[in-house]
Amino acid sequence: MGCQESESAGTGNDASASATTSSASSPSNEATSPSNGAPSGAPSHTTPAGGAEPSASEKPDEAATGDAVAGCDESRLQYTLVPVARPVNHMVLEAKNSGSAPCRMPDEHPTLTFYLAKTGETGAQSGPADGNDRHQVTIRPGESAYAGVMTYRGDVAESDGLDVSELGVGLTSDDAGKPMKIDTITVAEPTVTGWYGDFDAALDAS
């Protein structure tokens, strides 16, 4: 996960700064369950369902950059769809770098394909969220990038949505991604933001 810096005032003109860095977690071949696998450490105003609080990743301008950084791909990313307490029709998609080197997320919105809980057939595919929120985000090993997800619009009744239990994450517009199990949720015309280096920024943009 990313770095968060805090400054504390000292006596005279002296000041000290401390920074904490979370350690990388082991790669996994399965999606982390949102109910028990949400990252911890988010600012207090963002409270995921279940009580766990995800932490913000490094912001794009603080991440490692340079032409030598390779693009992120599915082989090194571990996805988690994180529920939040508010807004009720929003979630955050976390993409954690489980590899051994930094990688750069694509400068475009991911494509989310939701599969029906009962039949496994394609139920819905995400569209881009409103606004120009495409960013250059580089993530180091163990750190994450985030995309905000609106599962259904405010003018659409949840009862009119589709129950889905699998999600495919495509890094480009023509990529459906490999389906992974998620807790059953309801979607109706879902949208997704571009990638952010901060959990709350992605949620706010959704």
Image (cartoon, helix red, strand yellow):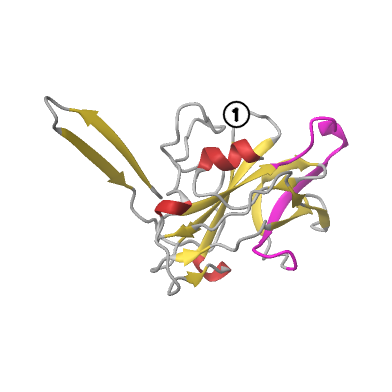
Magenta run includes residue 152 = yes
- Label 1 Cα neighbours within 10 Å, binned few <14 / some 14-19 / many ≥20: some
What type is the residue that disc 1 sits on?
Answer: Ala
Q: Is residue 9 above or below residue 94?
A: above
Q: Which residue is mark 1?
A: 85
Q: Quadrant of residue 135?
A: bottom right
Magenta run includes residue 2 = no
Marks counted in the figure total 1
Residue at the right extreme? 160
Q: Residue 150, position in %: x, y?
A: 71, 40
Q: Residue 149, position in %: x, y?
A: 67, 44
Q: Is residue 105 above or below residue 134?
A: below
Q: Is residue 33 above or below residue 46?
A: below
Secondary element under disc 1, as helix, strand or loop, is: loop
64 relative position to 167: left or right: left
Q: Residue at x 61, y 61 (%)?
A: 107
Q: Which residues are magenta?
A: 150-174
Q: Nearer the viewer, residue 69 or 111?
A: 69
Residue at the bottom extreme? 68
Q: Residue 47, position in %: x, y?
A: 52, 30
Q: Nearer the viewer, residue 203 or 92?
A: 203
